[in-house]
Image: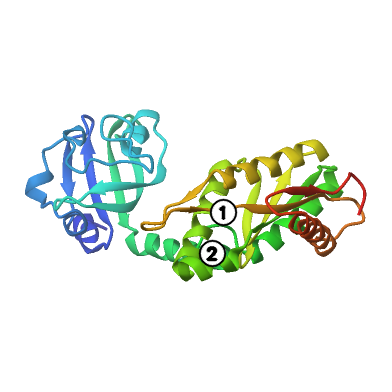
Amino acid sequence: MQYNYKSIFESLQDGVYFVDGDRRVTYWNKAAERITGYSEKEVVGSRCMDNILIHIDERGTTLCNGLCPLAAAMEDGNARQEEVYLHHKKGHRIPVSVRATPLRDKAGKVIGGAELFSDISSKKALQDKIRELEKLALIDGLTGLSNRKHIEGELTARFHEKNRYGLDFGILFMDIDHFKTINDTYGHVGGDEALRTVSATFQASTRSYDLVGRWGGEEFVGIIRNVDHQLLGKVGERFRMLIEKTRIEFPQTPFSVTISVGATLAVSEDSPASLIKRADEHLYESKKNGRNRLTICELGKK
């Protein structure tokens, strides 16, 4: 039975093209025209390395000079699938899922290749939307820091880690001093700017495996991993000093803020609630003793 394979390819919603052994395009279907904006006449006879589609990967690396999935499939004889970005004739980038396979003669020699590519713009948009929803659920909208829900989840994870592997961690409970006065003096716009600036300082000075998030209002919690009593105190004191030296760039009247800090290590009898409570008590001690200072719980003491 004879099949009209070209009519099948032309009916597909996915782009299809064939290349010969020199990676010169010999066939380009209607879907390829629609997805890329390039007509069959503009593409057939050109070579992949002529950079018509200029495939790039997630890092922006140009793939058309031998690094693309089709070239790799022809090189080692193995089919492969990847996600890349192609260049549309109008100039913009389109995310596509690429499936490349070598074409062989009757003796098994690779004599060309075929690539099928699908526009996954809607898939990417959906993935981005999911990530955005996840972000909205776990990130504080004003400061960009982790929100209370995320902090509570991380605390639970750190306790599992401590109980299973014996990895120590501690927390810093931090509060912006005289925040009501800041709001009264500079308005809520000034208060929000103070929160954003303090948060940016935390983000810039937090180790990659630690976490600082907004607990609520002007309160922040830092979860500091792999520390002892001395190191936890050093981290808390560094935060306090950096905030003290930070300037809030408020129009015409820049101002500074300070924080008070309560610090404690987690102990085996703790729960997230008891750990937060103890750190909050030490934060209160810092407030009571003049603010802009750190009070740290002695190791093992509550």
Camera-side residue of 164 and 16:
164
Camera-side residue of 118 and 112:
118
Q: Amino acid at mark 1?
A: Val
Identify the mark nearer the N-term, 1 or 2.
2
Placement of 230 over or under 295, stated as above or below: above
Residue 74 in view here: yes
Local SS, label 1: loop
Q: Quadrant of the C terminus?
A: bottom right
Q: Quadrant of residue 274?
A: bottom right
Point out residue 79 in the picture as x, y percentages from the top left corner.
Answer: 40, 41
- Residue positioned 16% across, 34% down in the render: 50
Q: Residues within 10 Å of mark 2 (few under 14, many from 20)?
A: many
Point out residue 172 in the picture as x, y percentages from the top left corner.
Answer: 72, 51
Q: CA distance from mark 1 to mark 2?
A: 9 Å
Q: Quadrant of residue 173?
A: bottom right
Q: Quadrant of residue 229?
A: top right
- Residue positioned 24% across, 60% down in the render: 8
Point out residue 84 in the picture as x, y percentages from the top left corner.
Answer: 34, 46
Residue 133 in view here: no
Local SS, label 2: helix
Q: Residues within 10 Å of mark 1 (few under 14, many from 20)?
A: many
Point out residue 34 in the picture as x, y percentages from the top left corner.
Answer: 18, 59
Placement of 278 over or under 227, stated as above or below: below
Placement of 220 over or under 78, stated as above or below: below
Q: Which residue is mark 1?
A: 257
Q: Which residue is mark 2?
A: 182
Q: Is residue 285 left or right of residue 72?
A: right
Q: Amino acid at mark 2?
A: Ile
Q: Are marks 1 and 2 in contact (CB under 8 Å)?
A: yes
